[in-house]
Image (cartoon, rainbow, N blue to C red):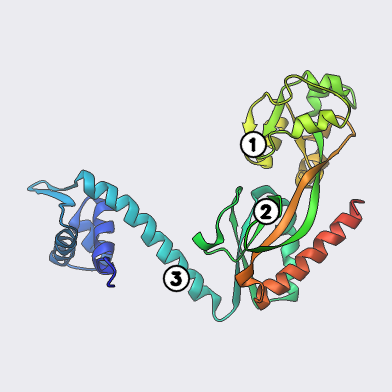
């Protein structure tokens, strides 16, 4: 069955004219004549059966339908251009499209990727932020670095590490002391992590404490946001130290109490079953699992 898709030339002409609100400027940008742009857009309007622009002696203006369509088309054309450039850039090399939880990807994975590239120069690893589960069938991802339970249907999971979170804050919140008690921490604003809503409850519980307001406080989706909020004295945060090594080293964050809590969930590499035979993914999986094992040994987690 033939797809109901207009010509790409018409879409490109329309997107340019919509962006400039001018057929003349679109023609200049696309190195076409103004009449050619008019014909392309006229043909698109005929194809769609609706008016995209209102014409007048003073120029053209998008209709409501034209404005809505231009926003959708611009996004889709950007995606097509991005995918085209990605294919052109591969030059026959193997590429892995990897979804990653942001702070883990930035603070732990990226600093180690140079080692993988040295071992496997033929493989390119592209990273895209994803904080929540998704369906591989609905995306172009080959694998995902995910924090949670390894229960994605139709996938193969590989354990990497648990989180061992500690309470951290600006040194100014310590009031000249080196450490706070758990009860003193309970009296401070507790910064919450959106995807770990019970983190403070579990941390206090591991000390045998029941804190009524342990789930109260501003919520942030990323650990990097939590770290910034804590740095600016907005409260105290539970963060795994390996995600804030720079802040701990430069003293903008300090550990408020030397008590960590191991998460019941963990970081996993998730690979859809249809991709497990990929040579590039196999090389990346083996390297990543070994790198995570070495990290756990160095951190005393094994």
Check if mark 2's residue and mark 1's residue have beta carbons within 8 Å: no
* Quadrant location, the C terminus: bottom right
- For label 2, the crowd category at 10 Å Cα-Cα, with few meaning under 14, some 14 to 19 and many 20 or more, is many
Residue 25 rendering spot, x and y as whole percentages = 23, 57
Q: CA distance from mark 2 to mark 1?
A: 15 Å
Residue extending farthest to the bottom is 92
Mark toward the start of the polypeptide (2 vs 1): 2
Quarter of the picture holding the N terminus: bottom left
Residue located 75% across and 19% down the image: 212
Pointer 1 local density, CA inside 10 Å: few below 14, some 14–19, many at least 20: some
Residue 169 visible in image: no
Q: Percent from the top left, x then y, of residue 290?
A: 82, 66
Which one is nearer the viewer's eye here, 107 or 155?
A: 155
- Classify 251 as above or below 42: above
Find disc 1 in the rendering and name its residue: 194
Q: Which residue is mark 3?
A: 84
Distance from disc 3 to disc 2, alpha carbons, whole Å, reads 27 Å
Badge 2 element: strand
Apparent side of residue 103 relative to residue 15 in the rendered image (left or right):
right
Across and down, in percent, residue 57 comes to: 7, 48
CA–CA distance in space, label 3 to label 1: 35 Å
Which structural element holds mark 1? loop
Viewer-closest of 209 and 99: 209
Q: Is residue 295 visible?
A: yes
The residue that mark 2 highlights is 146
Which of the numbered marks, if any, corresponds to residue 98?
none
Ranked by sequence position, the earlier of labels 3 and 1 is 3
């Amino acid at each position: 069955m033939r797809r109901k898709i207009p010509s790409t030339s018409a879409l490109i002409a329309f997107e340019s004219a919509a962006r400039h609100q001018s057929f003349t400027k679109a023609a200049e940008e696309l190195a076409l004549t103004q009449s050619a742009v008019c014909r392309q857009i006229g043909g698109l309007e005929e194809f769609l059966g609706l008016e995209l622009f209102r014409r007048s002696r003073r120029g053209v203006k998008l209709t409501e339908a034209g404005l809505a369509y231009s926003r959708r088309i611009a996004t889709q054309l950007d995606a097509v251009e991005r995918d085209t450039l990605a294919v052109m850039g591969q030059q026959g090399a193997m590429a892995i499209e990897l979804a990653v939880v942001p702070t883990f990807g930035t603070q732990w994975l990226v600093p180690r990727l140079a080692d993988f590239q040295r071992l496997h120069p033929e493989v390119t690893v592209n990273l895209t932020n994803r904080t929540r589960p998704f369906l591989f069938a609905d995306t172009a991802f080959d694998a995902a670095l995910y924090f949670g339970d390894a229960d994605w249907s139709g996938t193969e999971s590989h354990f990497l590490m648990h989180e061992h979170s500690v309470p951290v804050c600006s040194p100014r919140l310590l009031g000249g002391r080196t450490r706070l008690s758990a009860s003193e921490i309970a009296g401070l604003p507790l910064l919450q992590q959106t995807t770990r809503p019970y983190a403070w409850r579990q941390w206090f519980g591991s000390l045998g404490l029941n804190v009524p307001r342990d789930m109260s406080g501003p919520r942030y989706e990323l650990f990097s946001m939590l770290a910034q909020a804590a740095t600016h004295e907005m409260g105290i945060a539970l963060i795994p130290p390996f995600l804030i090594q720079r802040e701990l080293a430069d003293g903008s964050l300090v550990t408020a109490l030397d008590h960590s809590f191991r998460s019941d969930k963990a970081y996993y590499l998730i690979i859809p079953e249809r991709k497990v035979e990929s040579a590039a993914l196999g090389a990346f999986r083996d390297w990543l699992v070994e790198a995570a094992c070495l990290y756990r040994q160095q951190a005393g987690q094994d």
